[in-house]
Amino acid sequence: MSGLRVLVIIPAHNEQESLPRTLGEVRAAAPEAGVLVVDDGSRDATASVARRHGVSVLRHPVNLGVGGALQTGFRWALEHGYDVGVQLDADGQHDPADLAALLEPIRAGRCDVSIGSRYVRRSGYRAPVARRLGMVLFSGLVSAVLHERITDTTSGFRAYARPVMEVCQHDFPKDFPDAPLLIALGRRGFRLKEVPVEMRERRAGRSFYTLGKSLYYPYKNLLASLMALLQRPAQL
Amino acid sequence: MAFLSRTQVITAVGAVLLVLYVLDLVRRRKLSEEYSLLWVMCTVVVAALGFSTPLLTWLTRTLGMMGASSTVFAFGLAFTMAMLLHLSVKLSRLGQENHALTRELALMRHELEGLREDREPVGGPADTGPAERG
């Protein structure tokens, strides 16, 4: 395929158990891609485990959340001349074997952001009712705004082309880079596409999303989505 | 109504004490001038309402308040709200700055470690001469 330089960015917060397998799988699936682990203020051996696997490691002295970890990753990708940044969870939810599929629409120039979605093809995932309701709401909102069907707004398996990373390194939602981010990117004129992928059960560690934020999450995301709609697409 | 009621005296004296305390905090550099402004404005207004009966009764009548003390409280509350909002805005900005600094720190530390690794094979760690440390 065309020689795009790809950096796999893995935000990791206390993921020493699941990281080795994830890193091994990434290397096997995409040996030519660069790998960067952003240790987001871990208290365990995440950074040294990653270093032992020979990948680049950036460490946040305090926990910033996925958004902050990704921003750091984007900056690094830009400074090191990468064309695409892929966001991949450390916990093993995402199968690196899907990387090629995720990158394909960007390689072909059909989109600027591709989103690995678990709902395009049934992969046996069942979420609690409240969460499903939220997902329907946000995917409806995003799809309506973008005129492009996006079923999984919370997917943490995405590929961002360089121009998107350039915008995002300065302006990015802090804690949940979900629906508001997609809306903001769409309004800036970036094209988003969904790609079917398999999602697995997380192996170890705790999800970024289960930290007692069940009430704050929908409020914040709804508000931020509306703000993203109201804001003029900022000049670059 | 020429004389000050007891509540007026208490509010006014309290406000004066507070403004003195705020100024003292600024003097001891525990509070930056920037934040003292709203506090001083708040206490000055409350003290003025407390000491001046004509001003207070006029304001109470104009605003249609039920009692003079409500007017004092309303002003105090308005300032408190303004102060809290001001603080939330400042706090958000602090958070953003903190966020940016943390990210920058991660990148810089990585660069520093890289530089150190490049340097060590040449002369070993002992090579980093005392000249740099002064």
Image (cartoon, coloured by chain):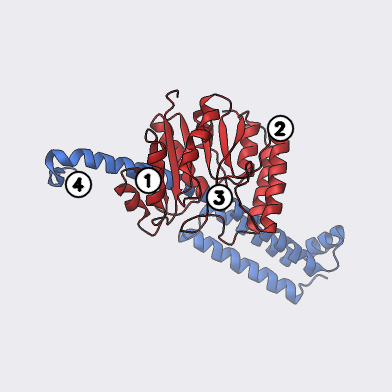
Residues flagged by tags 1 and 4 on a common chain? no
**CA distance separating discs 2 and 3:** 25 Å
Q: As shown in the figure, which amino acid type bears the numbered disc 3?
A: Asp
Q: Mark 3 or mark 2, which is nearer the start of the sequence? A: 2
Q: Where residue B117 appears, x then y in whole percent?
A: 23, 41
Q: Are marks 1 and 2 on the same chain?
A: yes
Tag 4 residue: B133
Residue A88 position, x and y percent, is 48, 44
Give coordinates of residue B5: x percent, y percent.
Answer: 77, 74
Q: Colour of chain A?
A: red
> What distance separates the C-alpha of mark 2 from that of mark 4?
60 Å
| Amino acid of disc 1 | Gly
Residue labelled with disc 2: A147
Mark 1–mark 3 contact, CB under 8 Å? no
Q: Residue drawn 46% across and 42% down?
A: A96
Question: Which residue is outermost to the bottom?
Answer: B6
CB under 8 Å between callouts 2 and 3?
A: no
Does label 4 lie on the same chain as label 2?
no
Q: Residue at x 57, y 50 (%)?
A: B92
Helix, strand or loop status at disc 2? loop
The three-letter code of the residue at mark 2 reads: His
> Chain drawn blue, letter?
B
- Residue A127 left/right relative to B59: left
The secondary element bearing badge 4 is classed as loop
